[in-house]
Image (tube, rainbow, N blue to C red):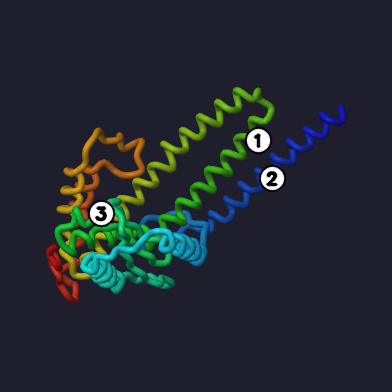
Amino acid sequence: MQGMAMRNHSGRRRRVLALAALAALAAVAVVSCVTEPETGRRRLILTSMSQEASLGQQSWTELTQSQPLSRDQAKTAAVQRVGAAISQVVKQSGFAWEFKCFASDEMNAFCLPGGKVGVYEGLFKAFANDAEMAAVVAHEIAHATARHGGERMTYAMAVGLAGLGLNMALDSKASENRELWMAAYAGVTTVGVILPYSRVHEYEADEIGALYMARAGYDPRAAVAFWEKFAAGKSGAAVPEILSTHPVDANRVARLKQVMPRALAEYEKAPQRRGLGVVY
């Protein structure tokens, strides 16, 4: 009987802690909704910019120590040239910009919180000019300035706490039934919360990126040309959008075309119009 009483007490204590954590998260959420200035989208971010920048710096240090840098001077100069032009039009405090080209055939690029930008040599197979690189670099920078990393961490925290609450609520159920419920919860939150927000971030980074490259003087229509070319070069069956972190290529290009009038207006106002920039 004493063992049963101790287990009941432990279960009640876990439920109280879970409810307290959820209540604390809800209270913080009330004052933590912020607006993305370029798109007007309201989003919940519980992390601070300094926390995000610190994590970005840590990842950057580890990456630059483990990944070899490109020895191709032309590619390195292009990354730094395009990156510098875009960073000058980004109105974001607390960013210490660095731009590096990494010696890898991977066709990828990234921007860590705090302004650490990397472009892999493999992407140069797809670039025809500076403007196409600007489309990719500006897209990655937009992920960082829009604080998508902090937003993803916030939603992961919320999903985790809600899962803890559900697990506590199911404490009295048989273990196999509880496992089925938790598996269903994981599937629903992945398809219904995490993946859709990832796609929202991709669309938003495309939009903000088009504005950034236009303000830096690169023709934003190069973004449409690049993503159309990039999509045409893919092989294999496409993953359905509902199960993907990224939008379907056709939808992405269509949304970019919708943004073009605003981006072209920014391009017309740019102090220096570079057009396509250096052609490779």
Residue 119 visible in the picture: yes
Give the distance between the C-alpha atoms of the residues marked 2 and 1, in whole angstroms. Answer: 10 Å
3 or 1: tag closer to the N-terminus: 3
> For the point 23% across and 65% down, which residue is it?
75
Of badges 3 and 1, the one in the foreground is 3
Mark 3 burial class by Cα count in 10 Å: few <14, some 14-19, many 20+: some
Q: Nearer the viewer, residue 43 or 88?
A: 88
Amino acid identity at mark 2:
Leu
Q: Is residue 180 left or right of residue 224?
A: right
Relative image position of residue 228 (x, y in whole percent): 17, 48
As helix, strand or loop, the secondary structure at mark 3 comes to: helix
Q: Which residue is mark 3?
A: 122
Q: Are marks 3 and 1 in contact (CB under 8 Å)?
A: no
Q: Which residue is mark 1?
A: 168
Give the distance between the C-alpha atoms of the residues marked 3 and 1, in whole angstroms. Answer: 48 Å
Relative image position of residue 131 (x, y in whole percent): 18, 63
In the rendered image, the quadrant that contains the C terminus is bottom left
As helix, strand or loop, the secondary structure at mark 1 comes to: helix
Amino acid identity at mark 1:
Met
Q: Which residue is mark 2?
A: 17
Give the distance between the C-alpha atoms of the residues marked 3 and 2, in whole angstroms. Answer: 49 Å
